[in-house]
């Protein structure tokens, strides 16, 4: 019985995290994990995305 409760809690946590990512992408946030998610910019070469907040993404 305890396994079902722990499994349910894990499923709820994963579901909420997936919902957060989905909603952030829907709003247009480029770098979800950054504190300044909306201010990330692309590099000069447009080859890869770099973040301006220093998180290394």
Image (cartoon, rainbow, N blue to C red):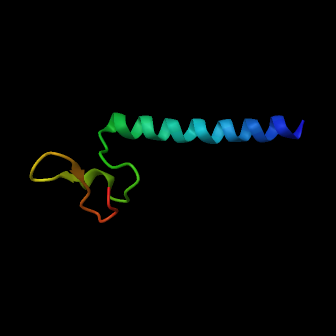
The one nearer the camera, 10 or 35, is 10
Looking at this view, is 47 or 19 the one in front? 47
Asked if residue 41 is positioned above or below residue 55 in the image, the reply reads above
23 is higher (above) or lower (below) than 37: above
Taking the spot 33% from the left edge, 38% from the top edge, the residue there is 27
Q: Quadrant of the N terminus?
A: top right
- Quarter where residue 35 is shown: bottom left
- Whole-percent x and y of residue 36? 32, 58
Name which residue lies at 29% across and 63% down. 53
Residue 46 location, x and y as percent?
13, 46
The image quadrant where one finds the C terminus is bottom left
Residue 40 x %, y %: 24, 53
The answer to whether residue 38 is left or right of residue 15 is left
Residue 10 lies in what quarter of the image?
top right
Q: Position of residue 39 (x, y in %)?
A: 24, 55
Toward the right, the furthest residue is 1
Residue at 37% in and 57% down? 34
Q: Residue at horizontal 35%, vertical 34%?
A: 26
Does residue 5 appear left or right of residue 37 in this picture? right
């Amino acid at each position: 019985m305890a396994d079902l409760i722990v499994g349910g809690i894990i499923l709820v946590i994963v579901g909420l995290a997936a919902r957060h990512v989905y909603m952030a992408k829907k709003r247009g946030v480029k770098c979800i994990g950054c504190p300044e998610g909306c201010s990330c910019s692309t590099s000069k070469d447009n080859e890869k995305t770099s973040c301006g907040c220093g998180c290394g993404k």
